[in-house]
Image (cartoon, grey):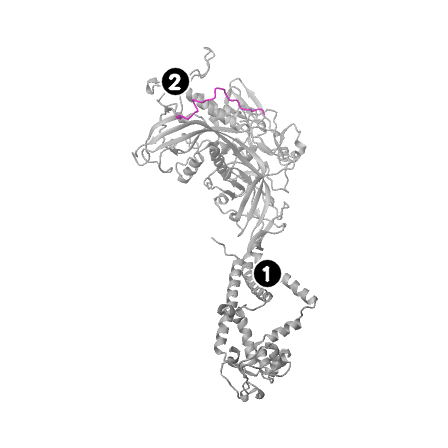
Amino acid sequence: MVTITVGYIAGIIAAAIFVSRIWVPMVLTFILSAILKDKNTAATWTLASRAFERTNWPDVLRSDSAKNHGVRRSVVFLTNLVSFMALLIAIAGIVTPLGIYQTLAPAKNIQTPFKYLLDNSPFGIGTPARSNLGFNRICVAAVEDLAAVTVPIPCPFTNTVDIESSNGIVFNSSFPYGYDISIPQILLDTYSSGVGNDTTISNFFDIQWRQYMTTTDPNRNYNNGSSYLVEAFRGMQTLGLNNDIEVVAGLIVDMVSGGIGFRNHTAPPGFQFGVTWEEDILFIEPETVCVDTNTTIDYKIGSIINGTEFPILDLVLTDRGGFVNINRTYPVANLSNPQQNQDLWTRAYKAAWDTNFLSMLWYNVTNPNNVTTGREAFSYMNSFMNKTFPLIELGITDSYTSLSMDETFNTHLNLGSDGPGNPLDPTAGGLPNPFSITSENFTAIGMICSGAGDGDYANITNILVRCGLMTGVPQRQDPGSNLIFQPESLWSQPLYSCATAVRTSIKTVSFVFNGTYELENLKVASIQPKNYSDANSLPLWGLENTGNAYTTSGISLIWGLVSDNYENNPNVSTVRQENLYLPGYFDLFENSPFTAIGTQNLPASDFYGKAVDSAYTVGDVEGTSVIYDYSGGNNMALWAKWQTLSANTTAAALIPNLIFTDYAAAAVVGTKGVLGPGNAATQNMVALTVTPTVSKIKYRWPFAIPALLAAFGLLLFTALAGFTMLCRRHNISRLRVHLNQLSPGRIFTTFLFSEPGVKNLNAEDWNKRFGKQMVDLSGEHHSDADNGIVPEKQSAAIDSQTVSDEHSGEGQGFLGENGHTGEADMGGEGFAK
């Protein structure tokens, strides 16, 4: 569709004017011709001739002035050049404006005040005002020989006094002066030192729970019974279907690739066409790698038997190469320096390998290594490409018709059923399960993939990695709609092993603000990794170094950007790099998805682990993921989106990322903005420049070609005219003589009157003396001198062969020596014959 610009409108107007300039004179001269008599004064003939010659009638009617027979070539060339230039200028007048268009373009950068933007969406409505109560945490330790039992212990740098006692049976821990759960000032200063209030980059303590609760310890241990904040999670508006970068209260939510940026939103008001600017923002984002197990779950849809479910028929596990082509070498991930190399692919591949190998043992496809007998693993292989193995249905149709994430890596096999390989009933399925594989064999896979459990030390090397087996949304295998489960249709579910870590980094965000002063008019144009000039300009990330005094499950470590003064501090582990991979651990039996109420207020340490856990319990048959249903079982649009992403491992890796992001958006907010922490300042704390968008007139130069040609011709011909004048070959006086000589009235009077110098009279004198003389071109002969057509002395008829001596010498000079007239009165017939 063609966009109508200002230039097009101007061109249309110019074209209309051009046509009007041609048409109107032609119409008026047509009327003039109707009222013009054959008998008029000499001045009338001159003026009328001027009017006619200024129209296109001579060219249309091919009258005398349009003929060039007998005309000097130079005159023909120049008269045609005049016509061509007139046409070129007319075309330029129409085409040239077409290149004009109005556009919005950036103006010069300026500094301007920012103002807070209120969010009227569900996120804004569901976000309460910030509390004045501070951050807090509770540190614990496992009781020796009772790993499942924990007791509080003092956190780093607190003044809590802990008196421990044990009688060998019962372990006691008492706090005679209470348990101080507040964050010591030294930690607040350390992990706020990397950024100040003069930057838009948030730090650890700029992140808060979106929802919170105030509670007290009934035993009056924590904070001596005074109030303190704890996490409170409630669902907001799910963004799972939004394939865009969303701006909500306190956050930038990237629903394209996953991740949240922390910003308390402000914008500069008062710009009619909008304004753009950039800010550096702290982001926390998941990083996921998925590996194909090369096995699938396949089945056929049966006929609907009731109003709620349809039967799953011929349920099998199909070997797509995962069994028959298994690598005979056990994979080993590089865990030597997880901050530099997370090796997520190898972790996920290793989990896939373990899953396939244990499944092969379950189905007696091959054997494990036996040190006692000396029999090596893979001594036999009872599988081939596309071989199928029976599965016992879980009893929940949604397990096969929607997305699920399984941290146990064995739910799809339904090992606890009375089915194939059940060692308690070998006859049930005919598979003996010779190696006694149970679900417990699979439960170690998640720990092996993660690399850190709840008993490992809490430090910078034990990063959070969560692993699980993704059962993708089924793909239809026979012709038909991918969105309809039709009877007898064939479906296949891919099985992917996925590993997810969480990192924090600084990104440069481009903002666009346009329209009324509302948050919905603040848009994110792009998110790019921040550019650093050299290695020394990279951010310095710090993480608590407790000297291995705490386990991963015993403390929520504080992290953040720190100043260079802490680079060699023994209490701070530091890395200078673009990203910091956040600490954490894996515990299959104590995984911690978001719950309604938490136990402490340290969101920047706790939320990301809960978000990952929530993402890896989607479709859990035990129903641990109850806040949002991300399986797609109850949302067809989400189901279709997951189906598209389930088609390959690269796209499937986005699924945990997006689920993580949706949970995280509902869990936390950023409190820092251009107006400082909490946007509490009355003027900008950050010196930001913005680029206003203004309306500008621009031009498309190809439309200027006719005008440029006309201008070139104008300059060229003007130069030639000037050169002619300088050479004294021509001047304005001579031009005036030619104009007078070509005037019809003067030509008539030159022949009619013998008075010398008629043709050389100036225009004013000629008009006064001869302008009213009547000239009759009707063709009728008149000799009456009173008519004023012929002077009295010329009233006699002139011989048709000779010219009387009484005739004007001027006329003879005009016609030449051989020229003659046919009628003495110079009527119309006289000129014609």
Residue 433 marker: 2
Question: With 478 as the anchor, is 83 left or right in this view?
Answer: right
Magenta-colored span: 318-336
**Mark nearer the viewer, 1 or 2:** 1
Asked if residue 308 is positioned above or below residue 353 in the image, the reply reads below
Give the main secondary structure, helix, strand or loop, of the magenta stretch. Answer: loop
Contact check, label 1 and label 2, Cβ < 8 Å:
no
Give the percent coordinates (x, y) of residue 42.
56, 80
Judge whether residue 272 can be spotted in this image.
no
Residue displayed at 44% across by 24% down: 322
**251 falls in the magenta region:** no
Give the residue at mark 1: 710
Residue 160, by quadrant, is top right
Q: Is residue 441 above or below residue 181?
A: above
- Sort mark 1 into few (<14), some (14-19) or many (20+) by Cα contacts within 10 Å: many
Amino acid under disc 1: Ala
